[in-house]
Image (cartoon, rainbow, N blue to C red):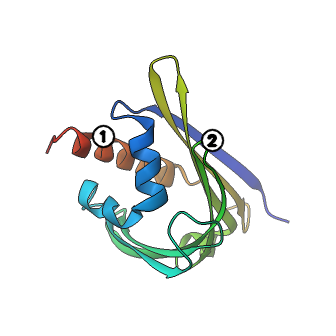
Amino acid sequence: MGLHGKLVAAIEFKAGGDVFHELFKHKPEHLSHASPIKVQGCDRIQGQFGQVGAIICWRYTHEGKEKKAKQVIRMMDEEKKLIEYEMLEGSDLLQLYKTFDITIHVETKGDIDLVTWTLEYEMRNDDVEHPMSMLSYFIDITKDIEDHHFGKP
């Protein structure tokens, strides 16, 4: 049995939590407009965007390499603005990790919207590193979306 891990990052999002949640829920294919260097597209394979059970395929660049990742939307909670993805195939992540799940949660505390990224995974062996670069990647995408929303280059 591999080593289980969990990484969490919460980032203030000044463009409004609803903007962020709606982008990932209903228009993930538009993410490439906000972060074109990191995300080249999102294709719907099965089901509808924003529906539990939908299968999507991300085309993205991480650490200078073009990659693909097929995921299923495992859970969605509209009230909590939460989406949970399970990695299915196509990503080199599954060569390193037996399981790799990504949860995006938007919560409002006072006047501040926080986007929380949670990565949960099981390493295939003890030599595998924790996916810190993926967590950093998602933080950067969050900042790109905010900059795009405000019209910053």
| Residue 96, x across and y down, in percent | 62, 69
> Which corner quadrant holds the N terminus?
bottom right
Whether residue 137 is visible, yes or no, is yes
Disc 2 to disc 1, C-alpha distance: 22 Å
Label 1 packing within 10 angstroms: few (<14), some (14-19), many (20+): many
Query: Which element is circle 1 on?
Result: helix
Query: Is tag 2's residue or tag 1's residue first in the polypeptide sequence?
Result: 2
What residue did someone put label 1 on? 146
**Residue at 71% over, 50% down:** 5
**Residue at 49% over, 31% down:** 114
Whether 29 is drawn above or below 43: the answer is above
**Residue at 57% over, 69% down:** 93
25 or 72: nearer the viewer: 25
Which numbered tag is attached to residue 79? 2
| Residue 14, x across and y down, in percent | 35, 30
Specify the amino acid type for callout 2.
Answer: Glu
Specify the amino acid type for callout 1.
Answer: Glu
| Residue 64, x across and y down, in percent | 31, 66
39 left or right, relative to 76: left
Find out whether the residues at labels 2 and 1 contact each other: C-beta distance under 8 Å: no
92 left or right, relative to 79: left
